[in-house]
Image: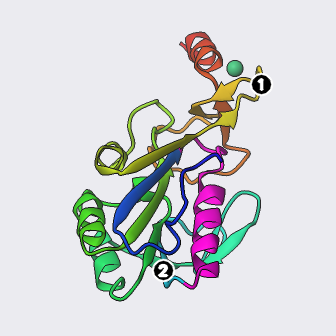
């Protein structure tokens, strides 16, 4: 078994799970998989994403392979706490775009007995830890790092290489704008760009 998830669907025990990785690593797919299992176990599930992420749909989390699940866009992490009373499992997607308050809120929810499953980009396109993600990784009970495949050499990819010339940190991802690369290929590309 890939993840030690026995009992998590039925045990009412607060915990924080973080799923992190580069773009195209399957983070959202893994989040959706866990949330669907919780639903099958008749857990009350709520899913939140930052309202900045409106690539495809206002109210659904849509992963790159179009596996989707109903979600609520929120402007700030504080709204997550307000909207989570009586919920067994809280899913949070694109956590890197949330404010730092998300760290405390995940802890508060878990302390109250809620299972919190967070998915997010661990690094931006410059290999810098992204927003609150390093803090969320620190406070997590369990961390899952998923990997994309390097489009240059086929090894596991950790980095999201930006193909277009734009220095803004937030540029919502589509296949045409980013490429997953391994360390070697990422460094090669950046050496040749300088
Ligand atoms: Zn490579």
Residue 174 shown left or right of residue 102 in the figure:
right
Residue 163 shown left or right of residue 191 in the figure:
right
* Residue 26 drawn in magenta: yes
Residue 139 shown left or right of residue 75 in the figure:
left
Residue 5 drawn at (x, y percent): 54, 57
Residue 31 shows up from this direction: yes
Residue 160 drawn at (x, y percent): 58, 36
The residue lying at 45 percent from left, 42 percent from top is 122
Q: In the figure, 123 relative to 188: above or below? A: below
Q: Which residues are magenta?
A: 21-42
Q: In the figure, 187 relative to 30: above or below? A: above
Residue assigned mark 2: 46
**Predominant SS of the magenta segment:** helix
Q: Secondary structure at mark 1?
A: loop
Asked whether mark 1 lies closer than 8 Å to ligand 1, one says: yes
**Which of 139 and 105 lies nearest the eye of the viewer?**
139
Q: Name the quarter showing ligand 1.
A: top right
Residue 76 drawn at (x, y percent): 32, 71
Of callouts 1 and 2, the N-terminal one: 2
- Res 150 → quadrant: top right
Residue 64 drawn at (x, y percent): 71, 57
The residue lying at 31 percent from left, 79 percent from top is 79
Residue assigned mark 1: 154
The residue lying at 35 percent from left, 51 percent from top is 140
**Which of 95 and 177 lies nearest the eye of the viewer?**
95
């Amino acid at each position: 078994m890939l993840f030690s998830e026995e009992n998590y669907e039925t045990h009412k025990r607060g915990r924080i799970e973080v799923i992190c990785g580069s773009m195209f690593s399957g983070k959202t797919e893994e989040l959706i998989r866990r949330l669907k299992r919780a639903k099958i176990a008749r857990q009350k599930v709520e899913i939140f994403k930052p309202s900045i992420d409106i690539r495809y749909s206002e109210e659904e989390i849509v992963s790159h392979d179009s596996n989707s699940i109903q979600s609520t866009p929120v402007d700030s992490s504080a709204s997550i706490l307000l909207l989570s009373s009586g919920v067994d499992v809280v899913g949070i997607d694109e956590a890197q775009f949330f404010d730092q308050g998300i760290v405390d809120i995940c802890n508060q929810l878990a302390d109250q007995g809620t299972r919190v499953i967070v998915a997010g980009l661990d690094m931006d396109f410059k290999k810098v830890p992204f927003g609150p993600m390093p803090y969320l990784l620190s406070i997590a009970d369990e961390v899952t790092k998923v990997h994309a495949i390097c489009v240059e050499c086929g090894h596991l990819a950790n980095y999201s290489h930006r193909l277009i010339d734009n220095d803004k940190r937030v540029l919502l991802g589509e296949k045409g704008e980013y490429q997953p690369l391994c360390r070697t290929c990422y460094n090669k590309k950046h050496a040749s760009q300088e």
